[in-house]
Amino acid sequence: MNSGRLTTHVLDTAKGKPAAGVRIMLYRLSGQSHRKIAETVTNADGRTDAPMLAGADLKAGSYELVFCAGDYLRASGQAGEGTLFLDEIPIRFGIADADAHYHVPLLISPFAYSTYRGS
């Protein structure tokens, strides 16, 4: 049985605090297939209450996390109703070892974002 897991969190770098209430969708990619396999919302600490994937559900392959940053930026008063510079932020990444912990955080502001493989 796999012991790996996929986790994420979102930090609001403009406000210097966790980003609560960010909707996140997870897709498994295979050839032309782009299938949603999980969806969650960040808690008050900007984290998910459970891993996005864990155990036997975590398989080696290509994935995409889509963060609904625009909804969060509007709700937090950092963006208006017009066209946003950042709205949905997709991050494609690969999982090579299904027994490892993959942590994919997102740091956002109204005009920039960054990510990295965390621990």
Image: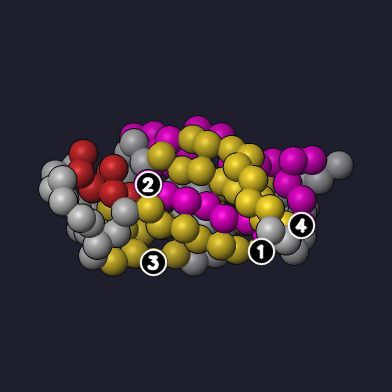
Neighbourhood count class around disc 1 (C-alpha, 10 Å): few under 14, some 14–19, many 20 upward:
few
Q: Residue 94 got which mark?
A: 1
Q: In which quarter of the image is the C terminus?
A: bottom right
Q: Distance between the residues labelled 3 and 1?
A: 17 Å
Query: Is label 2 or label 3 in front?
Result: 2
Write the start and end of the magenta stretch as one range: 41-68
Which element carries disc 1, helix, strand or loop?
strand
Q: Compare residues 59 and 34 and report the one nearer the observer.
A: 34
Name the residue type under label 3. Answer: Ser
User: Which residue has dot 4 on it?
Assistant: 60
Mark 1 vs 4, N-terminal side: 4
Neighbourhood count class around disc 4 (C-alpha, 10 Å): few under 14, some 14–19, many 20 upward:
few
Badges 1 and 4: C-beta atoms under 8 Å apart?
A: no
Q: Distance between the residues labelled 4 and 3?
A: 24 Å
Neighbourhood count class around disc 3 (C-alpha, 10 Å): few under 14, some 14–19, many 20 upward:
few
Neighbourhood count class around disc 2 (C-alpha, 10 Å): few under 14, some 14–19, many 20 upward:
some
Q: Residue 67 got which mark?
A: none
User: Which residue has dot 2 on it?
Assistant: 68
User: Which residue has dot 3 on it?
Assistant: 114
Mark 2 vs 3, N-terminal side: 2
Residue 13 showing in the rendered view: no
Which element carries disc 4, helix, strand or loop?
loop
In percent of width and height, residue 112 lies at 28, 66
Inspect the magenta stretch and tell me whether residue 51 lies in it.
yes
In percent of width and height, residue 88 lies at 38, 53
Horizontal relation, residue 116 to residue 11: left or right: right
